Image (cartoon, grey):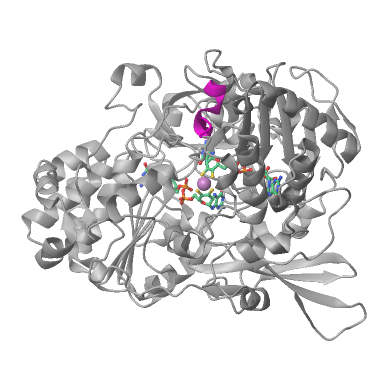
């Protein structure tokens, strides 16, 4: 469905799209097509949160789609996995029949030896799991626990509020205080920042809580640079002040919060002095923050996933999420907290889209994507992983502890198929690479985890070369496997029409491009949390120190004294866009930000090549001596393609595979390292 404008010299068509990327903003796109080619991607002016503006990355989307290095034909590996990658192009027919033959042989022994691996390369419901889910369910393949990003925070919100629910994005504009907590909004949640800025212009105070002095911290009134993984302690310290100064909303607590007495006993141990010592900040910062939070109304918290990538990340989210329950900030639509809005979509999504009935009662084993390195190397796993089918993800670059991930992918007895746009680090280790379409070439529908609109993405142009949508690749694989259920023949439009319940009018969505869900403005003003009894749940929430830190593991810290976090570089989207030259030129090269004192103690020069290492591995990058790093903490900006970094590795060489307290998520930001000048 496209709206035509008056034809000029060449016919110009405007197509309504949606940004597919893993980002809370899920922007509505306006795609300009001229002569069968996309010439421009812009934000839709009439979509409220997009308001016509896109980030630098996605405004370069055509550069990605028409990239000279797009994979546009199926490719078969001809070199050993430990050798430099060599592929030859093959026909779709040959690729599909060979892949099906390999999978059939494995499935005859045990289909659980076949492992899908996917994440949010596209967040679309169709090109995500709609047809892929059907394929793997019918096959009885192993399931994948999709934990790599957000599952600690998700489990925490569910334990506390009953689901992944939060404030509405636009009402942040009316807040008088916004805590931007574990979020570099300007880099990774730009369309929230617009509302925060509006609040700022209306007189609101903005406080950034982040170990790194980010570009967002630069624009806030105050920056609290706590140590990574100490947010739970800070939340308890704030509660101590709320309780001892009697800044509590007793009525709200009595009516809407369970487990407060237990929480109170715990919080009373967290004096400002003790909190400050654990968090690496001052007691006055704790007192001042508590006073601001208690006395400014309405007060909102934009919590984000950065702070849950540590051992105690789940509990930390629980504790922060309880703050607005103690002060009654939820009473106002401009108060409360937003970590994720994705739970609001649950009643509007069709739970049958991926056809779980095709499992026919089987419950295949589940493998955690965050410890894929260990899973691939585990010889006791029964059955061993014999085949991997990767789509919408680049695990060799993004999964923790890459020395093990690489070794696993290099197993000569592993059969790997990768559906991709580009020869990523993961595609380099495949047996087959299958060319997938980009968002400009396929249909999809989208929800969001930052706002509450559903969006449609109409295809703007025909698939390039021999590329096919993920849905079509899984349809054809299903046919090659001999799966004959009617659901494998459904078209993308049929899938799109089934994706939501009748409450979403599909034709209106297709026409307008987006539809807002009908949800209360101040969802918990009078309680009504999604827990079984409707009350927020404080039971059991406590601070847990990192696996690795100066405080929790002093012996390890004597050898590797620096805490490393690895948040995203602004112009990349995880490992996507690293190969788009105009964006890589802005980022320059992989950087490690380090404080001047830490650099001086190691004789490091600004701009010099350094080796970052610990017991797990090492990688090389350039040192940036910078006030963005606090003493004791280094920031290794991610996630570069290994092969585009100096000496072919990236920051995940040093991260570990241990999991968070809740949700079994990775601990990317819970990691000790040492740094030295590289030879
Ligand atoms: N430009 C850009 N945008 C993105 C992405 C991208 O790669 N690039 N990635 C997308 C994805 S997949 C996600 S999940 C989101 C991620 O976005 P966020 O959820 O905001 O998470 P991060 O960017 O990982 O971290 C946010 C901030 O948390 C800080 N941080 C690290 N450790 C701690 C800690 O222990 N406590 C506190 N308080 N702060 C900490 C980091 O320094 C960083 O500035 O963004 C999405 N948007
Ligand atoms: N050290 C460190 N590691 C991290 C993080 C960190 O902060 N620090 N962040 C973590 C987080 S939050 C996340 S979410 C993960 C993200 O990890 P991934 O989900 O793997 O995300 P990307 O690296 O963007 O890789 C997505 C891939 O999908 C491909 N793709 C996109 N669209 C399509 C499509 O339609 N079809 C097919 N077949 N392929 C497509 C892209 O080309 C890209 O190569 O990384 C994690 N890794
Ligand atoms: Mo993520």
Residue 432 visible to the viewer: yes
Q: Is residue 619 magenta?
A: no
Along the line of sight, which residue is nearer the eye, 276 or 373? 373
Residue 211 visible to the viewer: no
- Residue furthest to the top: 379
Task: State the residue at coordinates (90%, 34%).
Answer: 89
Along the line of sight, which residue is nearer the eye, 174 or 471? 471
Q: Is residue 370 above or below residue 498?
A: above
Q: Is residue 586 above or below residue 505?
A: above
Image coordinates for residue 199, horizontal then vertical, percent: 38, 73
Along the line of sight, which residue is nearer the eye, 607 or 377? 377
Image coordinates for residue 18, horizontal then vertical, percent: 64, 64
Q: Is residue 224 above or below residue 117?
A: below
Task: State the residue at coordinates (79%, 39%).
Answer: 434
Decide if residue 194 is on the left or right side of residue 200: right
Quarter of the picture containing the C terminus is top right
Q: Is residue 366 magenta?
A: yes
The magenta segment? 363-375
Task: State the residue at coordinates (87%, 84%).
Answer: 7
Image coordinates for residue 283, horizontal then vertical, percent: 17, 46
């Amino acid at each position: 469905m496209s709206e035509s404008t008056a034809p000029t010299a060449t016919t110009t068509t405007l197509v309504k799209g949606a940004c597919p990327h893993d980002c809370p903003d899920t922007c509505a796109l306006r795609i300009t097509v001229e002569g069968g080619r996309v010439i421009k991607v812009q934000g839709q002016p009439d979509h409220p949160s997009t308001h016509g503006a896109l980030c630098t990355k996605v405004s370069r989307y055509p550069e990605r789609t028409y990239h000279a290095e797009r994979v546009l034909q199926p490719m078969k590996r001809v070199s050993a996995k430990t050798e430099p990658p060599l592929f030859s192009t093959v026909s779709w027919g040959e690729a599909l029949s060979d892949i099906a033959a390999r999978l059939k042989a494995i499935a005859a022994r045990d289909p659980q030896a076949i492992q899908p691996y996917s994440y949010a390369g596209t967040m679309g419901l169709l090109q995500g799991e709609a047809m892929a889910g059907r394929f793997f369910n019918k096959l009885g393949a192993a399931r994948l626990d999709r934990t790599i990003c957000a599952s600690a925070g998700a489990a925490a919100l569910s334990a506390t509020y009953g689901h992944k629910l939060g404030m509405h994005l636009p009402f942040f504009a009316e807040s008088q205080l916004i805590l931007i907590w574990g979020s570099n909004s300007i880099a990774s949640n730009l369309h929230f920042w617009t509302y925060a800025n509006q609040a700022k212009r209306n007189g609101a105070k903005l406080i950034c809580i982040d170990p790194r002095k980010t570009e967002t911290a630069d624009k806030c009134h105050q920056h609290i640079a706590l140590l990574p993984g100490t947010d739970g302690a800070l939340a308890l310290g704030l509660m101590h002040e709320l309780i001892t100064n009697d800044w509590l909303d007793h009525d709200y607590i009595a009516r809407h919060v369970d487990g407060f007495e237990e929480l109170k006993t715990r919080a009373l141990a967290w004096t400002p002095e003790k909190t400050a010592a654990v968090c690496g900040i001052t007691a006055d910062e704790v007192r001042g923050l508590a006073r601001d939070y208690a006395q400014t109304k309405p007060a909102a918290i934009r919590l984000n996933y950065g702070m849950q990538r540590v051992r105690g990340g789940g509990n930390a989210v629980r504790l922060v999420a309880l703050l607005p329950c103690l002060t009654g900030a939820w009473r106002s639509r401009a108060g409360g907290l937003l970590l994720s809005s994705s739970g609001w979509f649950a009643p509007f999504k069709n739970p049958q889209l991926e056809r779980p009935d095709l499992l026919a009662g089987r419950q295949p084993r589940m493998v955690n994507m965050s410890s894929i390195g260990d899973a691939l190397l585990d010889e006791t796993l029964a059955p061993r992983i014999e085949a991997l089918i990767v789509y919408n993800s680049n695990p060799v670059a993004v999964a923790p502890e890459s020395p093990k991930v690489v070794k696993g992918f290099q197993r000569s007895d592993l059969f790997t198929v990768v559906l991709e746009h580009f020869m990523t680090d993961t595609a380099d280790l495949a047996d087959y690479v299958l060319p997938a379409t980009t968002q400009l070439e396929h249909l999809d529908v989208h929800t969001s985890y930052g706002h509450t609109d559903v969006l449609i993405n109409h295809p703007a142009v025909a698939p390039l070369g021999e590329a096919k949508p993920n849905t079509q690749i899984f349809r054809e694989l299903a046919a090659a496997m001999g799966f004959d259920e009617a659901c494998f023949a459904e078209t993308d439009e049929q899938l799109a029409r089934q994706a939501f319940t009748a409450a979403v009018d599909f034709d209106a969505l297709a026409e307008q491009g987006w539809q807002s869900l009908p949800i209360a403005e101040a969802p918990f003003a009078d309680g009504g949390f999604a827990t079984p009894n409707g009350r927020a749940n404080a039971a059991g929430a406590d601070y847990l120190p990192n696996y690795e830190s100066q405080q929790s593991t002093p012996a390890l810290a004597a050898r590797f004294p620096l805490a490393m976090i690895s948040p995203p570089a602004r112009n990349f989207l995880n490992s996507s866009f690293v190969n788009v030259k105009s964006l890589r030129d802005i980022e320059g090269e992989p950087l490690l930000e380090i404080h001047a004192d830490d650099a001086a103690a190691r004789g490091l020069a600004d701009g010099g090549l350094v080796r970052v290492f610990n017991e797990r591995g090492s990688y090389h990058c350039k040192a940036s001596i910078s006030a963005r790093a606090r003493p004791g903490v280094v920031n290794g900006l991610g996630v570069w393609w290994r092969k585009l970094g100096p000496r072919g590795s990236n920051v995940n060489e040093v991260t570990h595979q241990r999991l968070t307290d809740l949700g079994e998520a990775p601990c990317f930001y819970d990691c000790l390292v040492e740094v030295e000048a590289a030879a």
